Structures are given as structure tokens and as C-alpha cells.
Amino acid sequence: MKAPALLAAVLLLPASVTPAGEVLSAGPAPVPGGRFPAVAASAGPAPSKPSWEWPLAPRPGVLRAFDPPDKPWMSGHRGVDLEATHDGVPVTTPESGTVSFVGVVVDRPVITIDHGNGLRSSFEPVESSLATGATVAKGDAIGTLLPGHCGARPCVHWGVRRGEDYVNPLEFVLDLRPSILLPLSRGRPGPGQDDRAG
């Protein structure tokens, strides 16, 4: 095996498989503004292939990234704020599940969907006519967005918990694993080089 190919194999192997054969959770990708969202250490591995849908259409921009606190009692941002086209848009469930909570928390209407396997999504401020125990399929409307969470900009706050730990919701809709650039092989000319023998 040539040295560049061997180096590539060595670099890729630890990034893709653990001793148990599970996919590793790599660092998150940057979000608008160039910041890298933090990921809770106890959050567990990110899915290797995101399979959920965005809760807003068209695909929303991220106004505020996931930024969990160092300790559970400290301040932070335990979800993401997604920009909506306007207030009153439908909010949809990113994955199938059962409504586990509909009500007001502090001063905002919240709806929570239990997706099973310890995963729950919460959305606010969302007004919903659904009742606790209702079953929803991926993409179903679960309520309408109310104004006020991001000031004058319409947005929904989306939080995801795995057990009691908040995790980055974007890991379920985006591939947050880092890209790995491999070296060009020696036999190939680079950009602007002549491949003819001199």
C-alpha cells in the first residue's frame, strides 16, 4: 500500500468505527455566524445518517445555535431557534411519535412529541389543538407558530432531549460530522500543472 493511501486509511478508521463497531459522534459543523455549536458530553453519538425532517418549511435558517450550559443549572441555549417565513406558519413534527405535553410553560405555549427510544422534541411558542396521547406521523402539522420568541423575527425554538440530556436538534436533520480532505496522489497533476512529461 502506498504511503498516501495508508495515511488516509489510518486517518479514516478511527473517525468511523469504535471497537464496538458503532459510528462515532464527531464535532459539530459551524452554523451561521461561523460559531460551532456545543454538544453535551453525555449526549451520546449522533445519528450517522440524519433521518428527521425540518419542523418548518421551507428549510429554515438557524437564528441561534445550540449552546448547552456547562452545568444543568447554568444558563445556556438548550435548543435551536429556527427562522420562519412569518408568524402563524404550521410547525410540523420532524419524526413520528406521540404528543406527551401540550400547555403553557412560564408564559409560552409548548408542545412536546415523544419519538420513542428516549427522544423527545419540544417546540415553542406553538399553539396546538392536539391533546396529550395523540399520535402524529413525520411531517404532520402539530400547531401554529405564535410571535414573540425572537422579538420581531418569526422563529420557533426547537429542543430535543435524549433521556434528561438536551442534545443538538440539528444532528437529526444535518450531517454534522466533519469533512476529511485527503491528499492528492503523487501521480496526478495538481491544478495548473502540466501532466505531460517534460
Image (cartoon, rainbow, N blue to C red):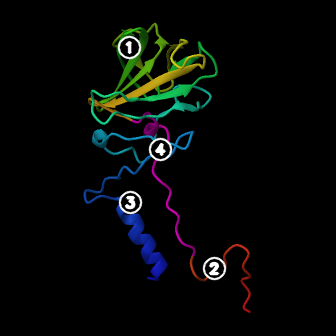
Up-down: is 147 above or below 182? above
Neighbours of disc 2 within 10 Å: few (<14), some (14-19), many (20+) = few
Residue carrying label 3? 15
Neighbours of disc 4 within 10 Å: few (<14), some (14-19), many (20+) = some
> Mark 1 or mark 2, which has the lower sequence index?
1
Distance between mark 1 and mark 2 Cα atoms? 59 Å
Q: Secondary structure at mark 3?
A: helix
Does the CB distance between marks 3 and 2 fall below 8 Å? no
Residue carrying label 1? 134
Q: Is 179 within the magenta? A: yes
Residue carrying label 2? 188
Please report the bounds of the magenta region as a residue range: 168-184
Up-down: is 39 above or below 153? below
Distance between mark 1 and mark 4 Cα atoms? 36 Å
Residue carrying label 4? 36
Front label number (2 vs 4): 4
Which amino acid lies under the numbered mark 4 shown in the image of this protein?
Phe
Front label number (1 vs 3): 3
Q: Residue at x 33, y 30 (%)?
A: 161
Residue 172 coordinates in the image, percent (x, y):
44, 37
Point out the residue furthest to the bottom here: 198
Distance between mark 1 and mark 3 Cα atoms? 40 Å
> Mark 3 or mark 2, which has the lower sequence index?
3
Which amino acid lies under the numbered mark 2 shown in the image of this protein?
Arg
Residue 44 coordinates in the image, percent (x, y):
30, 43
Q: Secondary structure at mark 1?
A: loop
